Each structure stands twice: as C-alpha cells, then as structure tokens.
Amino acid sequence: MASVKLVKVNKIYDGGVHAVHDFTIDIKDKEFIVFVGPSGCGKSTTLRMIAGLEEISNGDLYIDDKLINNVAPKDRDIAMVFQSYALYPQMTVYKNMSYALRLRKVDKEEIDKRVREAAKILKLTPYLERRPRALSGGQRQRVALGRAIVRKPKVFLMDEPLSNLDAKLRVAMRSEIVRIHEEVGATTIYVTHDQVEAMTMASRIVVMKDGFIQQIGAPNEIYRNPANMFVAGFIGTPAMNFLHGELIDENTFKIDDSDFEIKLTKAQQELLKDYVGHRLVYGIRPENLIFEKQEHFEEYKDYTFSYKSNIIELLGDIINVHGSIGKSKIILKTSSMYDIKQNTEVKVAINPEYAVFFNETTTKAITPDYCEFEEVEVTESLDEDNITIVETKKKGLISTIKGKINEKKNKKDDK
Ligand code: ADP
C-alpha cells in the first residue's frame, strides 16, 4: 500500500531556475501515473524530488501520509529505473538482480525466492545464469526492472526507461511494463516526453509545460477534453487543428481570412451564448474531419469547408492531408484508400460532436463550468498601463468592463 502526495512542491535551482511550480497531486495506491511534456518542462526534476535525489525548495511530499521531505533517499522505500540502466557486466543476471538485497544482508533463501519470482514475472528465468552482454536490449531493460522489483519497494519511479531502445522494442516493452505493473501492483510514476507512451500506459497522465501542470486526467479524458490549447496540441498525432475566427452571431463561427462559416450545434450555441461578437478558436482533431467521399459526409453539411492540399503524408492505411484556410493550418487524417492528391481542393465536414472551443486570449478550453472572459481590475489611477488582467471563473464581457473603465476615466477627467 503506497500513496504519494505532493502539495505545492516547487524547485528553484541554485542560479534561480524555477523548474517546478506548485506541483500538487494525490496519487493513489497502485496507480500508474505518467508525467509527460516537452523537454525541460520539469518532469525529471519532480521525479528526482520524489526520489530524494533533489531537494524540495518549497512544499510537502508525503508517502502513505507520512511527510518525507527530509527522509534520506535510501529510507524512502522507492526504486528508480533510469534510461541508462547500468548492469554489472561481470555478474550474471541472477547476481545483478540480487545485488541490492545482498548488500542489505537479506537472508539467502529470501533472496533466491524474490529473484526467482521477479524472473518469472519478467520472463527471465531461462537467462538467470547469463551475463548482460549475451542478452538483447529488451532483456537487459527487464533485468534493470528486475533489480528494482526484487527490492519490493513501495513506489517505482521510471525516468524515460525505454528511450534507448529501438522503436519496435519500445512498443513491445510498453505493454510489458504495463503487464508487470499489473502483476507487481506497486504505485508507479513514469516520466516520458512521448505522448504515445503516456496515452498507452497511464492510468492518469500529468501534462506539464514550463514547470507548471497543465492538466491531470485519464488518457481518454485528456484526449477528449483538453484543458487548454497546449494540451490539445501536445496529445494526439497529428496535433489538433485550431481554426481561429469569430462568433459572428449565436449560430455562426466565421473562420478568419476565409468565406467559410460553420454552424454551431444546439449544445454549442448554449455553451457559447456569451461569446457572440468575440474571437474564438475552434479546435477539431484531424481524425474528426470527414472527407467528402466518406460515409456520413452529407449528415454534416452545415459544418463543411474546403482547402487546397499542399502536403500529403501517406502512412500506409492512413493519409494526412495538409493545407491551410486563411492563416490557420489544417490537417485531415483519413483512409489512404481515398488517394487524395497534392494541389487539389479537399472538401471536409467537421464532426461537431468532437469540437472543442478555446478562448483565444487565455488559450483555455471553454466548458459549461469554465466559460471565462478576462476581467480587468479597475485601479485607482486608471492608467491604461496599470490595468491588471485577472482570470476569474465568473462570466463577464470585456466590452462591459472597458465601458466601466471609460466611465471612471471620464469622471476622473471631469474632476
Ligand atoms: P524534463 O525532465 O522535463 O526534460 P528537467 O526537470 O530536467 O526537465 O528540467 C527542468 C528545468 O530545470 C530545465 O529548464 C533545466 O534546464 C533546469 N535544470 C535541470 N537540472 C538543473 C540543475 N541541476 N541546475 C539548474 N537548472 C537545472
């Protein structure tokens, strides 16, 4: 049983780099959590703070409700598996796996039991007497995992453990690690920059950017309901299409620099009723566009537009058709059987059920409980430069607030 809780954990390195900001999460026993984000977003730093390899500048870290900020790494009951797993070349697999237990003077019989159990889970039993150089990359990686498993730690931490393996082996090891996690059942925190690994392995994903958590959620939740444009663009390949434009009336979204107007569904009209006259970003994934020759295209004729294909990416069964409308880039992902050619007019329909709308200024997704506008705090001086923009969960119209400012300004001028 091991839960891991981080409360407003921060890391400021000597020299002032604020690598992690207010990282807060409650990880339950047996969860498989993946931290994902671009290089430098603070994933490894967070993991290393949990391991105790990096000091926490601010905030609290609990394992099983016990504060462990100041507990030494070796006493945290955590095992860490790195990208570069250094196995001892002169030792057999058995000895590599049992090494840490021998150092801890664990009873010989107990060591043997644990190594054989782990070898069984990892399918390494036939290789126990081999040396690492006589193993494949995947088998070596499993020995590295085995060394961690025999210690029966409360928590496993894995930092990009698959990135040294070739693409095929990586795919195979992904499902191996998930299977091993299910058998061993220990709470696992896994770091990767690869969104496919995150989607396929995690019970919950933590998406990070510039040291800040962007969203925490189950893979499907993050895919279907991204919290902001960064998450929407980072998770999924190709990335979500973002059509910039304006809601010209309660039922019509006009794409910038084009003549295309897309109707809103009833639910979307309700969601966006306060946005009429405002700029918006219409998000739709490439796989949720319907090519005109596809079944159901007619059903969605209120949601169509066309563009000129400029790059065609053929991926066997799938074809990605790139182009642009006005300044917005667009990609259709469909079956390659349609054989769409470069420099042709491509007509597509949006499946509006999958559309996500974003506030263009804050980049946050608009949802029934988060339909915010920027609000402007009216300061005493009323100097334009002195206006603080605050984000609130309240609804409010920018124009109304600007009106208020002008009202106050006029009063001030009158004085
Ligand atoms: P990730 O694992 O997401 O690639 P890291 O956690 O390694 O990111 O790094 C987060 C940020 O902290 C980066 O800007 C990185 O340059 C910085 N950083 C990492 N380690 C150190 C260090 N020892 N000293 C100063 N800055 C560091």
Image (tube, rainbow, N blue to C red):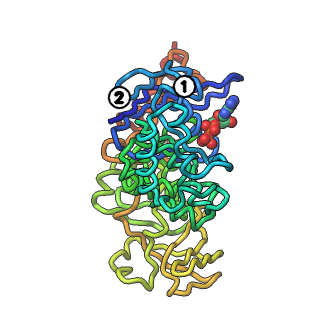
| Real-space Cα separation, disc 1 to disc 2, in angstroms | 45 Å
The number of discs equals: 2
Three-letter code, disc 2 = Asp
Which residue matches tag 2? 64
Picture disc at residue 297:
none
Which residue lies under the disc numbered 1?
387
Secondary structure under the numbered disc 1 in the rendered image: loop
Q: Is residue 233 visible?
A: no
Judging from the image, what secondary structure is the residue with disc 2 in? loop
Q: Residue 167 sits in which quadrant?
A: bottom right
| Name of the residue lying farthest toward the top | 415
Disc with the residue nearer the chain's start (1 vs 2): 2
Say above or below: 293 vs 324.
below
- x, y (%) of residue 29? 33, 39
Image point 57% across, 68% down: which residue?
168
Give the amino acid type for the residue marked by disc 1 in the picture: Ile
Name the one closer to the observer, 160 or 20: 160
> In which quadrant of this rendering is ligand 1 seen?
top right
Which x, y percent locates residue 378? 48, 22
> 10 Å neighbourhood of mark 1: few (<14), some, or many (≥20)?
some
